[in-house]
Image (cartoon, grey):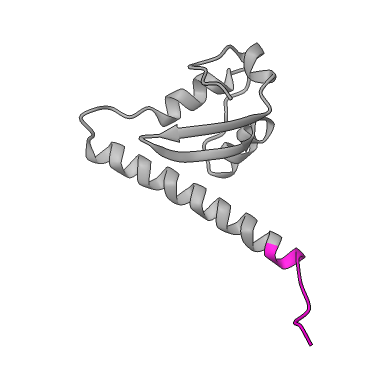
Amino acid sequence: MCTIHQPSSEAFHYFDRLILMCDGNIIYQGDAKGSATYFRKIGKPVPRFANPADYFMKILAINYPKQDADEEKIKELNNQYHAFLEKAINAENNTVRLEAPK
């Protein structure tokens, strides 16, 4: 595990797993290659030819002291990630069905 602040697009290409945080909240955790797809699904697509790491830093940046807009952004990103997790958990639960003991 390592922390890299704003890696180059070349370095980002070599990442396997990724955790993105905003104000101490996990906003994305998963395959680095799936991060752009996730952000596209929540309405924040990575621009073509952009370095994903630079774009994520821009999206996740918070101004301090926090203003109402910053609090709303944190809440929205948090809600979207929790909805994403809930959907993934429900899908997994639907694929694993154990018979009740007899």
Numbered range of the magenta stretch: 93-102
Instruction: Name, please, the residue furthest toward the bottom.
Output: 102
The answer to which of 20 and 56 lies nearer the viewer is 20
Q: Could you tell me what secondary structure mostly forms the magenta stretch?
A: loop
- The answer to which quarter of the image holds residue 2 is top right
The answer to which of 30 and 55 lies nearer the viewer is 30
Q: Residue 56: image x %, image y %?
A: 50, 27
The answer to which of 11 and 51 lies nearer the viewer is 11
In this rendering, would 68 be left or right of 21?
A: left
Q: Residue 97: image x %, image y %?
A: 76, 71
Q: Residue 84: image x %, image y %?
A: 56, 51
Q: Residue at x 40, y 46 (%)?
A: 76
The answer to which of 77 and 48 lies nearer the viewer is 77
Q: Quadrant of the N terminus?
A: top right
Magenta region includes residue 31 = no
Instruction: Name, please, the residue furthest toward the front.
Output: 102
Total numbered badges shown on the rendered structure: 0
- The answer to which quarter of the image holds residue 41 is top right
Magenta region includes residue 95 = yes
Q: Residue at x 60, y 58 (%)?
A: 87
Q: Residue at x 64, y 31 (%)?
A: 17
Q: Quadrant of the C terminus?
A: bottom right
> Above or below — where is 99 with respect to 78?
below
